[in-house]
Amino acid sequence: MLGVQLAELLDGVPPGVGEALDLVTGFDDALVHGFARLSEERATALTSLAGALSATPLGGRVGEAAGKLAAGSVAEEHLTALAGGRAALFGAVHDALLARLDTALGRVRASWEEPPATPALAADNLLSGCRSWLGELAITGWRGVDHDLVSASSQTIEALLPEPGLRRLAVLLDGLAAELRASCPVGTVERLPARRWADLWTRALLLSQAGGLPSASGAAGVVSGRLLILGVDVHEHGTAVQMQVHGILEPADGTPSRLVRTSVAAAKVDTIVGPALWRLLEGYPALLGALAGHRCLDVTDLPLLGSGDLVWHDDRARMGEPVDPFATARLQLAGALAPAVPPLDRHPVRIAEPVLVEGYRAAADGTLDLGGSTLAVDVDRLPACGPLTPKLVASSSACIGLVRWDGGRWLLQPLAVQTTVKRQTVEVHTGDWALGPTDPKVVKAEARAGDAVAVLRERAGRLLRR
Amino acid sequence: MNTDGAAWEQRSVARVVSPVQPRKLASVPFVELADGRLQGVVSSGSDIARVYVSSITAGTHAFNCSTNNNRPCGGLRGSPCKHLHDLAGAAVLQYGLDQVARYLHVEVGDGADLMSCLNGRHEPTPGAMVFSRFLRHLSYLELPDTTEPIAEMHWFPAMGAVR
């Protein structure tokens, strides 16, 4: 990303974004206090949200739902309609922001093609269990949430988790429930993550509609070629971890290179943190080896989803020659075709566009000055399972990162940096410890703690012995 | 849009649960705030084959420590045993003092120790429930991996490199 591109990105907010977000804020405030007893002001906020959608296919339903809620009647279908309305507003915000980013970067993006329909998963009981818990939350409002209401979700989540087709919903609900539990009793908490929890609630309600969660498998073509890694983005909450690798695929059939993502995810317990996370993913030696060794991967017949996600099969990949991610970014990033975004996933939180930034001045306050424009670095997003630290970012001269947007501003999430240590140029990547830490201090600490999974299993075995 | 960003309340990604600090799992393999208790599984300091179930009830601060077949811990002589101290220590590491104190309904003054602020009595409680919750906790580790993208995880970035 060049200085002029950053200047264009930061040049004002796309029209309508501020207004759309104000409507969402009104909805989120209503959810804080619950839909059971809406004040006049909050009922008006819902009506305004419905008004903004009146010219859309959702208009009728959302309008009716806002009216019913204002009159004091709360039914599941009305909550669903409002969740749909809120998601549609964010979809529009997402599109405006991503279009701005693509224009600034000169990035060409594929258009979405609806995959052939796959049969919906038969899980009506589980899904209706989710919907009724989400309904209770909405009626009560975040302020009224207590331990009993949070615990009411446990059985449903436990039943969702083993279902591969429902994992997305399970992981989402488990993450939300853990945050609510940690904040109980929510009524006494000073400030609430109102936008965040409303996001998670909305998403969960949409995913728990019958047929709301399309199965990814089956709906894809397959590709072969060379995968050049740019970096890895680490996602984690107490009971789940996902490593999402960003890279460039050079298809074997000679079609143009494309930007792709590929993900591996595992369930975990909250006490497994830091570099130990990688051990949960030992079943993917080729991918982890390529991350740790900065190598490319030769892949054969991997499913490629319309979202640009390669569905990883480690046995269909072979580690190839060493390839420097910075070289990949310099040579290939500008020309690669970016993937479309699936309609349901259109939310600003999913914007994570890989860029190469260099020739900047890093300031002590965690910002980069690039040709007179200032880009904030999201240093919170540096994972503890890798060697990249805020200090290294602050002393860096080049950075591969993901451009993100949150809280009304653009941010850069570093995945790798080039920096100078003892007059030598070194590279540090978030995935450098994929095969185990390389920093002797961290190796020692890990050795002292032992293999968490093995320790837990051994201790549990002592319980069952007698 | 200032450089501090919009209000925290209007962020989609915000830290709500503080990251768990790494701790040695061998001495306290499991700790949780659930069922109205701070409860968990604590290893015996002397016998590698033995584990205890220890708990402190919210509100009353009644405590208990027993083996898995409900034999009371020999260290309980009217006051909390070493296992209960270990349990509390692990809970504070894992959840932070604020959250543990809030759950147990106890005021812990600046610099004070959690255990010294409790004034409950020994009350036997069945340990089987805690054991089964520990096993349920471990069942996460038996779930299959997945390589289908979980788009929802974008709301849950790994945050924690404060080194």
Image (tube, coloured by chain):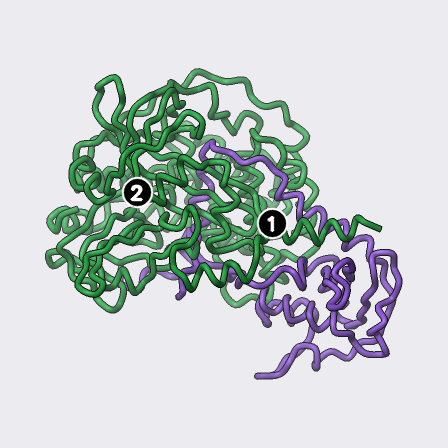
Mark 1: give few (<14), some (14-19) or many (20+) Cα within 10 Å.
Answer: some
A400 over A84 or under it: above or below: below
Whether residue A410 is visible, yes or no, is no
What shade has chain B been given?
purple
Q: Chain of mark 2?
A: A
Marks 2 and 1: in contact by CB < 8 Å? no
Circle on res. A453: 1
* Residue A38, horizontal then vertical, whole percent: 56, 52
Horizontal side of A181 relative to A338 (left or right) equals: right
Horizontal side of B87 relative to A233 (left or right) equals: right
* Residue B135, horizontal then vertical, whole percent: 72, 48
| Residue B3 quadrant | bottom left
Question: Do the residues at pointers 1 and 2 share their chain?
Answer: yes
B44 over A274 or under it: above or below: below
| Residue A378 quadrant | bottom left
* Residue A147, horizontal then vertical, whole percent: 68, 57
Q: CA distance from mark 1 to mark 2?
A: 27 Å
Circle on res. A282: none
Q: Chain of mark 1?
A: A
Q: Residue drawn at (59%, 72%), measured in percent from left and top?
A: B97
Residue at disc 1, secondary structure: helix
Whether residue A323 is visible, yes or no, is yes
Residue type for callout 1: Val
* Residue A336, horizontal then vertical, whole percent: 21, 31
Chain letter, colour green = A
- In front: A300, or B113? A300
Query: Mark 2 highlights which residue?
Result: A294
Q: Residue drawn at (52%, 36%), measured in percent from left and top?
A: A168
Q: Residue drawn at (61%, 48%), measured in percent from left and top?
A: A137
Whichever of labels 1 and 2 marks the residue nearer the N terminus, that label is: 2
